[in-house]
Image (cartoon, rainbow, N blue to C red):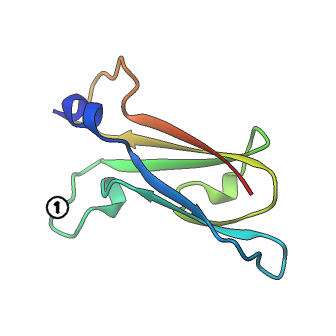
Amino acid sequence: MWIQFLNRVSLIDSLNVTETPNPDGTRNVTLSTLQLGQLRQPGNEVVGERLEVRWMQEGVEEVVLRDRFQVQAMAGSWVVHVELLSPEVHSDPQGLLKESFEFQV
């Protein structure tokens, strides 16, 4: 079921970086994903399902930003990695449960 679904859609819907910098020079970055895992509506949850979000700046993970969908990012090259973790999926040979997006701040 998941493999067929993710063959047609992406985990990452969009990523938005604000034009205007914050006073400290960072910019607000908002990640929009499918409404899965911790983003599911109440009553529609799946036990054990979650989206893992990792933010990398210049190839180094910013651990304090893990699993956040809105961050303040310093200038540089960034990659956000999103992975759907679900007890309903036992094998993902095509890597459809993982997606990455590169961007500049």
Along the horizontal axis of the image, is 101 left or right of 60? left
Residue farthest to the top?
Answer: 93
The total of numbered circles placed on residues is 1
- The N terminus lies in which quarter of the figure? top left
**Residue at left offset 35%, top offset 60%:** 38
The answer to which image quadrant residue 105 occupies is: bottom right
Residue farthest to the bottom?
Answer: 23
Q: Amino acid at mark 1?
A: Asn
Disc 1 element: loop
**Residue at left offset 29%, top offset 47%:** 48
Q: Where residue 92 sits: x, y (%)?
A: 33, 23
Along the horizontal axis of the image, is 35 left or right of 33? left
Disc 1: CA contacts within 10 A as few (<14), some (14-19) or many (>=20):
few
**Residue at left offset 36%, top offset 30%:** 96
Q: Where residue 68 sits: x, y (%)?
A: 54, 61
Position of 37 relative to 42 (above/below):
above
**Residue at left offset 78%, top offset 69%:** 26
Residue farthest to the front?
Answer: 19
The answer to which image quadrant residue 75 occupies is: bottom right
The answer to which image quadrant residue 20 occupies is: bottom right
Q: Nearer the viewer, residue 12 or 71?
A: 12
Along the horizontal axis of the image, is 32 left or right of 101? left
Residue farthest to the right?
Answer: 24
- Residue that numbered label 1 is attached to: 44
Q: Where residue 88 sits: x, y (%)?
A: 22, 35
Position of 9 relative to 32 (above/below):
above
Q: Where residue 70 sits: x, y (%)?
A: 56, 67
